[in-house]
Amino acid sequence: MYLGARLWSGAEAWINGEVDQGFGLDDTLGVAGFPSGEAYKVGKHQPYLRLPRVFIRQTLNLDGGTESAESGANQLAGAHSTHRVVVTVGKFSVGDIFDTNQYAHDPRNDFLNWASIDAGTFDYAADAWGYTVGTAVEWYHGAWTLRGGLFDLSDVPNSAHLDPGFHQFQSMLELEQRHRLAGLPGRLVLTLFNSRARMGLLEDAVSLAQNTATPVDIAAVRKYRSRAGASLNLEQQLTSDLGLFARLGKAAGNVEPYEFTDIDRTVSAGLSMQGTRWHRPADHVGLAVIDNGISGKRERYLNAGGLGVLVGDGRLPHPGPEQIIETYYSLAVVQAAQLSFDYQWINHPAYNRDRGPASVFALRLHAQF
């Protein structure tokens, strides 16, 4: 449920409530590019209530022309200037504002794979459900937008609890350029992040295990340090009913990931098409290809028995890139409901050439009003 209210001129307050139940496939383990963006790293057998978002957004209009905004989830209808500053404060997802893409970013409507809807290397601040507390500031000026943010990290990597004192945090910087090619709109987005927290170096964990004849334990070598990453995100309309998207990402490969998944480098690209050509304009079909990789240090860490956020089976003698193909068809059953059929082919799950390929099938029903 999305509940919003206008507080004063340019200010909106929002609270989202949801009921969850269940677990991710295989307890959300076994593959770095996990096949469902609607699956969390925690779960329960019984339904439970959560408040993933509680935030205030203030829009400060500057000069320039006027643009209209339609009402939607977490957005009230209205108008704003093309030159403006937007400040968001509270609890929400970093992905609500950063690394967005109209063709591949919403697991309730388009692709499902974690590395399709975000850059796989984007280790954004979040609890185990994908939400955090912080502030984002956006400056829109014509065809450009500059974004910055400061967000709370979990108390320990991959935790269900945020750091209570904000001592472990993540800073964000993003630059977006909007353009038109052959009269068709597109966007190019550069996203940078830096996490400051207690994290372990992979080689330190392996060395300690070898010197003490004990299992590899990354928690035993955690110290306060940084992990940085960058990604490039493209969306481009090719025709009136066909769009292209692509992402390229890299993150530090010598430090454990803190929140998201075990990917040090990623490349993804795909197409999204409306069903206009077969007289189903409300239908959509998508195709994505993904190639995820890890550093040599992470290969040695996993081969020595180390565990990551989602991967690690005690041995990795034949490492290789994790390769994924995803396709979906979203069928408009009625105006307010879509039924989607999704298929994913995953080669070398968790970077292990001795595993896979694996096929994952999904059925998704999404209704909203």
Image: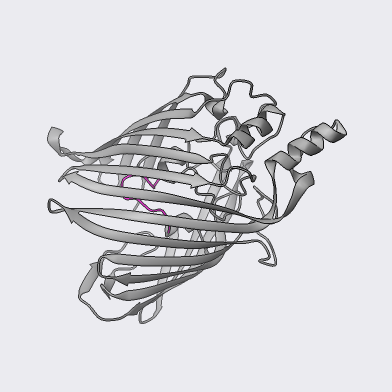
Q: Is residue 107 visible?
A: no
The residue nearer to you, when weighing 335 against 291, is 291
The N terminus appears in which quarter of the rendering?
bottom left
Q: Which residue is depicted at the point 74% across and 50% down? A: 222
- Image quadrant where residue 85 sits: bottom left
In the rendered image, the vertical position of residue 208 relative to residue 54, given as above or below: above
The residue nearer to you, when weighing 8 against 104, is 104
- Image quadrant where residue 24 sits: top right
Residue 108 spot, x, y in % from top left: 40, 44
- Image quadrant where residue 8 sits: bottom left
Report the magenta residues as a range: 98-106
Residue 292 spot, x, y in % from top left: 48, 34
The C terminus appears in which quarter of the rendering?
bottom left
Magenta run includes residue 100: yes
Residue 212 located left or right of residue 204? right
Q: Which residue is depicted at the point 36% across and 65% down? A: 75
Q: Is residue 295 visible?
A: yes
In the rendered image, the vertical position of residue 173 relative to residue 241, given as above or below: below
Examine the residues drawn in magenta and state their main secondary structure. loop
The total number of labels drawn is 0
Residue 202 spot, x, y in % from top left: 69, 41
Q: Residue furthest right?
A: 212
Magenta run includes residue 61: no
